[in-house]
Image (cartoon, rainbow, N blue to C red):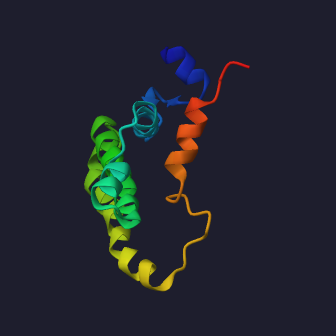
């Protein structure tokens, strides 16, 4: 496996590319959430009946995935606090965005669950 990673350029000078494990873990957690149906944004959206909670939940899900990925990746561990705080900071702008920005009619939080359900119910074996 190490030889394969070296050939792909993911190991340089005997060290794995910084952030590689972080990327794998982060995206794997997102994919796991999609396939298991586990979703913080859906939980908050359904619990509060509000799309703002869904936006906050989606953001928090990414921060949590960042936290876990940074803790697992030894090349990113020292950056964990910065990654998490940097991920939380944009949440402070949500009230301003809600007040001054008009969301698109095709906003992802509107109808996304119905689209995903339709995709899951479609035949994948054509």
Q: What percent of the width, then of the height, locates residue 17?
A: 48, 36
- For residue 61, say whether it is visible: no
For this rendering, which residue is in front, 51 or 7? 51
Res. 45 in view: yes
Query: 32 above or below 96?
Result: above
Residue 27 x/y as whole percent: 46, 38
Q: Which residue sits at x=57%, y=30%? A: 121
Q: Above or below — where is 101 with respect to 15?
A: below
Residue located 68% across and 18% down the image: 125
* Number of disc labels: 0
Q: Which residue is depicted at the point 29% across and 61% down?
A: 48
Give the residue drawn at x 60%, y 36%. 119
Q: Is residue 6 left or right of residue 86?
A: right
The residue closer to the viewer here, 49 or 91, is 49
Which residue occupies the extreme right position in the image? 126
Work out whether residue 25 or residue 54 is closer to the camera in this orientation and state it. Answer: 54
> In the rendered image, which quarter contains the C terminus?
top right
Closest to the observer: 65 or 12?
65
């Amino acid at each position: 496996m190490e030889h394969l990673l070296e050939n792909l350029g993911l190991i340089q000078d005997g060290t794995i590319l910084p952030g590689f494990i972080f990327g794998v873990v982060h995206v794997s957690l997102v994919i796991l959430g999609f396939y298991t149906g586990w979703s913080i944004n859906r939980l908050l959206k359904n619990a509060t009946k509000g799309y703002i909670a869904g936006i906050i939940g989606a953001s928090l899900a990414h921060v949590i995935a960042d936290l876990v990925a940074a803790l697992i990746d030894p090349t990113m561990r020292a950056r964990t606090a910065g990654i998490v705080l940097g991920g939380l900071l944009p949440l402070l702008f949500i009230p301003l965005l809600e007040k001054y920005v008009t969301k698109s009619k095709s906003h992802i939080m509107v109808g996304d669950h119905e689209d995903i359900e339709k995709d899951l119910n479609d035949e994948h074996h054509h």
